[in-house]
Amino acid sequence: MQKVETLNNPILLQRADPWVYKHTDGYYYFTASVPEFDLIELRRAETIQELGEAEPVVAWRKYESGPMSANIWAPELHYIDGKWYIYFAAARADDIFDHRMYVLENDSANPLEGEWVEKGQVKTDWESFSLDATTFEHKGERYYVWAQRDPNIVGNSNLYIAKMVSPWEIEGPQVMITQPEYDWETIGFLVNEGAAVLKRNGKIFMTYSASKTDFNYCMGLLTADEDSDLLDTKSWKKADKPVFQTSEENGQYGPGHNSFTVSEDGTQDILIYHARNYKEIEGDPLWDHNRHTRAQVFTWNEDGTPNFGVPVRDAK
């Protein structure tokens, strides 16, 4: 009889923008933003819960100056064509919020071993604030989704999609699929960021996060038909309300920047996200590092859409 995942939150303390991936070797792999924003760490375990006790391995450290020297944010680990890739954003020590997107590659069977090689910056249409890249395959094509500031659009970041010609290069056109427009997407900052992709029931679902990173932070949802042109803005329908947000009753504030995985036996879908367990923050929320990694099972509505419910209470 296969084990079924038991989840008690938080999974890891002070790990924001969490990414969990269950590989074919049976291990769960984890990465996230660390409080110092100075390196990328990886860990693995046989259960999601055990990730909290797993020994972290440093995959890469920031530089002292120049590109990739400040605010290393939101790494994701992907396995593509037999190699491992880490997608992440980094700024410069002389301009700590001028982020660009970069890729690392490792050809070891176990990404906690071997050498991570820098493949360079992912170039888009503009040299502007860009971050939170993810990638997914659909019908033989690989796509890249990311958040970026369009110099001609008021706001902080919109979501874009493009096809990839390699795991570190995109080709045109790049298409904007959502920009902040609803009240809940524009609190504090005009932000759409942190996309994560889920394919099910003939649809491609894309969650993303919106607003300032305090208790107003929340998750939105885009939906496209699996047979539609994913590079057509009109293919993506946006929910007009958040699909996952603060629960004062359960003491969970600002849930977001999620990823998806499955239970050990593969029968349950699991939402990985970060949230705080208090509402009031002194100063800039970015420097409050108590966004802890959390996980919970989610279900599906009769119409085939995901039902994320509300953030569950902390167990400890």
Image (cartoon, rainbow, N blue to C red):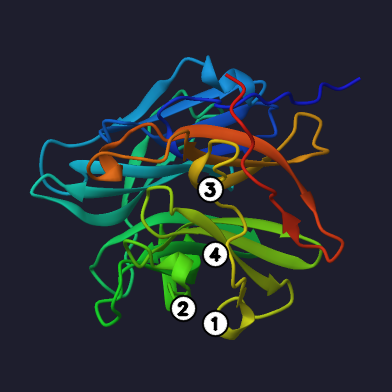
Instruction: In this rendered view, identify the residue nearer to me: 73 or 27.
Output: 73
In this view, the residue farthest toward the front is 249
- Is there any visible trace of residue 22 in the rendered image? no
Q: Which residue appears farthest toward the right when viewing the image?
A: 1
Q: Please identify the quarter of the rendering in which residue 150 is found.
A: bottom left
Amino acid beneath label 1: Thr
Check if mark 3's residue and mark 1's residue have beta carbons within 8 Å: no
Secondary structure at numbered mark 1: helix
Q: Which residue is located at x 67 percent, y 37 percent? A: 296
What is the distance, in whole Å, between disc 4 and disc 3 at their CAs?
31 Å
- The residue carrying pointer 4 sits among few (fewer than 14), some (14 to 19) or many (20 or more) residues within 10 Å by Cα, namely many
Taking the image as shown, residue 102 lies to the left or right of residue 113, namely left
In the image, taking residue 32 as reference, residue 234 lies left or right, namely right
What residue is pinned by disc 1? 233
Q: Secondary structure at mark 3?
A: loop
Mark whose residue sits in front, 2 or 4? 2
Residue type at the position of mark 4: Tyr
